[in-house]
Image (cartoon, rainbow, N blue to C red):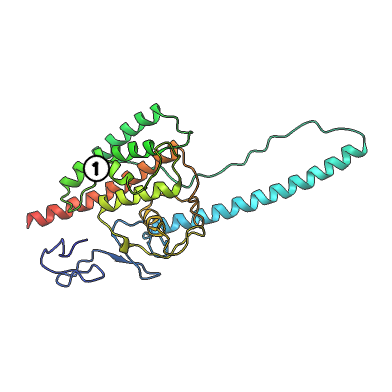
Amino acid sequence: MFSLCPRCENGKLDSTGKCLQCGYTLREKCEDCGHYNIPTARYCGGCGRATSFKLRLQQTINRHINFLQKVKIRKFAAGAAFGGMLAFFAFGSMGMRADIELPVTITTINQHHSAEFHKPFALSFEADLKEMRQSLDPHRQAGLADLTSMVDLLIRHLRPIAIEAGVSRLPAESAGIYARALHNFSKTKSMTRGSTTVILFHFLSDLLDFQYRDFSQESRYSDIPRFHFLTVPANALNSLGVHISRGEEVFGVNDHLTVGQMLEYGREIMAVAEISFEEKKQAFRSAAAR
C-alpha cells in the first residue's frame, strides 16, 4: 500500500489510510463494523455489508427472493405429497392406476448479473473470452489449465493498462506464477472453489495492490474456520464482488467448478478492474499535472 499520499504526495498515511496533511482517505470505513476497506471494495471485508446503497438494496431484494423461493418450494412439496397420498388411496381403492406423470419444473433466479463493459480493453477481453468459450465445453469440470488460460487472458489485457495507470505493483507476466500457490497440485485434477480462490486472490492482490491485512480474518462461511488459510482470500473476493462462493453462508470449498463458471469469474474480475484502473489513471494524471 502507499506510504505517501497519492494526492498531495507529501503527507504520510496513518494506519487507517488517511493523509495527515490533506485529509485524503485511501481506505473507507464501514458504517456497521468499522473495518477499513480499499476504495474498490464493493462489500465490506469485515462484515460483508455492501458499500453502496444500490448493492445494499440488491442484497435485500435477493434475500427476499430466496425466502419466497424456499417458502414456495416447501408449500409445493407439501401440496404434492398430500395430493399424491390422496391419489394413491383414491385410485388404489378403485383398483385403478395413475400412470400419468406430471413434470415438475422449479425455476431458479440467477443472482449474478453479467457485467457490462465500456472501456476498449474490457470490450477486447470480452471478445477474446467469447472465442475461448466457443472452443471449450462450458459444462465440463474445469482443470488447472482452464484457470491459467483465463488468468493469462486477463493478464494480457490488464497488464498494459496497469502500466499506463502508473500502479506501483504489477501482475505477473504469466498465470503460472500464481498457480505455484497450489503446491503439488496435479494439472489433471479438477478445480474446486477453494483452489480457484487461492489463485485468484494472489492474482488480484497484485492487480489491485492489496494485502492480507486489508480484509478480516473472521470467516463468514460455516465451512471455513476462523484464521483458516482460505478465510482472507474468500473475504477478499466477496468484498470485491467476485461471486465465487456457493452462497452467503456456505462457501463450498470442495465444490468442483465448470469451465463456464470459471469464465464468468473472469468477467467479474474484469468488471472490478475496469472501475479500479479508471480511478487510478485519474489519480495518476492529476498527480502528474501538478
- Residue farthest toward the top in the current orientation of the protein: 135
Residue in the foreground of this view, choosing between 73 and 265: 265
Q: Which quadrant is home to the N terminus?
A: bottom left
Q: Residues within 10 Å of mark 1 (few under 14, many from 20)?
A: many
Tell me if 201 is positioned left or right of 194 in this view.
left
Q: Where is residue 124 shown, x and y percent of the image? A: 27, 34
Determine which residue is flagged by label 1. Answer: 158
Evaluate whether residue 119 shows in this view: no
In the rendered image, which quarter is residue 5 located in?
bottom left
Give the residue type that dot 1 points to.
Answer: Leu
Residue in the foreground of this view, choosing between 118 and 276: 276
Tell me if 64 is positioned left or right of 100 in this view.
left
Residue at 37% over, 55% down? 233
Q: Secondary structure at mark 1?
A: helix
Residue in the foreground of this view, choosing between 202 and 220: 202
Residue at 24% over, 47% down? 171
Q: Where is residue 160 shown, x and y percent of the image? A: 19, 41
Residue in the foreground of this view, choosing between 60 and 121: 121
Q: Where is residue 101 shown, x and y percent of the image? A: 74, 33
Tell me if 239 is positioned left or right of 88 in this view.
left
Q: Where is residue 57 shown, x and y percent of the image? A: 44, 57
- When the figure is inspected, residue 277 is found, relative to residue 44, above or below; the finding is above
